[in-house]
């Protein structure tokens, strides 16, 4: 069933930041959102996850309008890794990951045996066993990012929204996070919507790419349909050479120069 977005507009005060978008995310799809800085990518994820209230239009999760679902129900279906994260200062990795279970807990809000097993699984999946009892403020940027990914995994969502999940990570952890996303998608049938900065990574790891520019959806399609001379020039302002990655069966490009000087 997936996610359906109809004529979505989002505002900060009077300023319209998402200017009427329509698209669908099908079940089991990995969709990347790419676009220049300030184009509205984080705002779009916030709107879909109901973190932003000043919106018009409709968003459906598996056919149900999110305005008619209660917050915990949305949180059981959909997890978001925000770009800017706020956490209480004095918590351990294990506690942060455990927060992912909260929408699933019944009255009393105590973690049961099954919840603890899921927390262990999320910690193992993100390679954080040796950091379990560490306070998150003592972690490096990359370790902290993995702890947040662990929290969204513990939520066991059907839809996973990731806002720049590879930021602060060195290249091996970037690949690890993206491989993990792919594995979760394949084994648990999670649909993933992620904002990525690296277009080559978006091309490699996505079924579809949505390109956003200035609050509008300008192109959507498979990596082959989207990674074109025209797009790289007019949206990203680079002249690039495009090649085929035969191993991963996707396009990749090498930027050569700025297309139009500012
Ligand atoms: N809390 C806010 N209040 C006012 N304007 C905001 C706020 N957050 C983002 N914006 C503005 O909305 C636009 C889109 O921002 P954002 O969605 O964060 O872009 P992206 O994630 O694509 O870089 C930008 O012009 C940004 O300055
Ligand atoms: Mg952003």
Image (cartoon, helix red, strand yellow):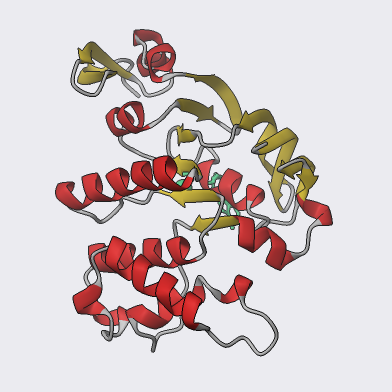
Describe residue 24's horizontal placement relative to residue 161 as left or right: right
Image location of residue 128, percent across then percent down: 25, 70
Does residue 219 lie above or below 11 as drawn?
above
Which quadrant would the N terminus be assigned to in this image? Answer: top right
Q: Is residue 106 above or below residue 179?
A: below
- Residue 223: image x %, image y %? 39, 20
* Residue at 53% in and 21% down: 220
Whole-percent x and y of residue 161? 51, 49
User: Residue furthest toward the front?
Assistant: 113
In the displayed structure, would residue 150 be above or below residue 171? below
Above or below residue 61? Residue 149 is below
Residue 146, located in which quarter of the rendered image? bottom left
Quarter-wise, where is residue 108 in the image?
bottom right
Q: Where is residue 150 shown, x and y percent of the image?
A: 38, 65
Q: Tell me the residue at 62%/62% (across/down).
A: 76
Image quadrant where one finds the C terminus? top left
């Amino acid at each position: 069933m997936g996610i359906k977005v109809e004529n979505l507009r989002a505002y900060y005060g009077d300023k319209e930041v998402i200017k009427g978008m329509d698209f669908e995310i099908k079940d089991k799809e990995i969709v990347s959102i790419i676009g220049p800085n300030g184009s509205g990518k984080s705002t779009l994820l916030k709107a879909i996850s109901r973190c932003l209230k000043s919106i018009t239009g409709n968003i459906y999760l598996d056919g149900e309008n999110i305005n008619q679902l209660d917050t915990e129900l949305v949180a059981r279906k959909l997890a978001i890794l925000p770009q800017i994260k706020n956490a209480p200062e004095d918590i351990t990795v294990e506690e942060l990951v455990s927060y992912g279970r909260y929408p699933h807990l019944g009255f009393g809000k105590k973690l049961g045996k099954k919840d603890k097993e899921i927390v262990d699984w999320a910690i193992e999946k993100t390679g954080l066993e040796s950091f379990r009892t560490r306070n998150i403020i003592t972690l490096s940027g990359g370790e902290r990012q993995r702890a947040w990914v662990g929290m969204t995994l513990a939520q066991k969502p059907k839809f996973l929204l990731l806002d720049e999940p590879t930021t602060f990570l060195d290249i091996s952890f970037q690949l690890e996070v993206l491989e993990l996303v792919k594995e979760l998608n394949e084994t648990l049938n999670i649909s993933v919507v992620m904002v990525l900065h690296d277009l080559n990574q978006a091309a490699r790891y996505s079924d579809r790419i949505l390109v956003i520019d200035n609050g509008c959806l300008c192109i959507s399609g498979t990596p082959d349909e989207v990674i074109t001379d025209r797009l790289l020039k007019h949206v990203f302002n680079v002249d690039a050479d495009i090649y085929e990655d035969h191993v991963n069966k996707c396009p990749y490009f090498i930027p050569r120069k700025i297309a139009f000087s500012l």
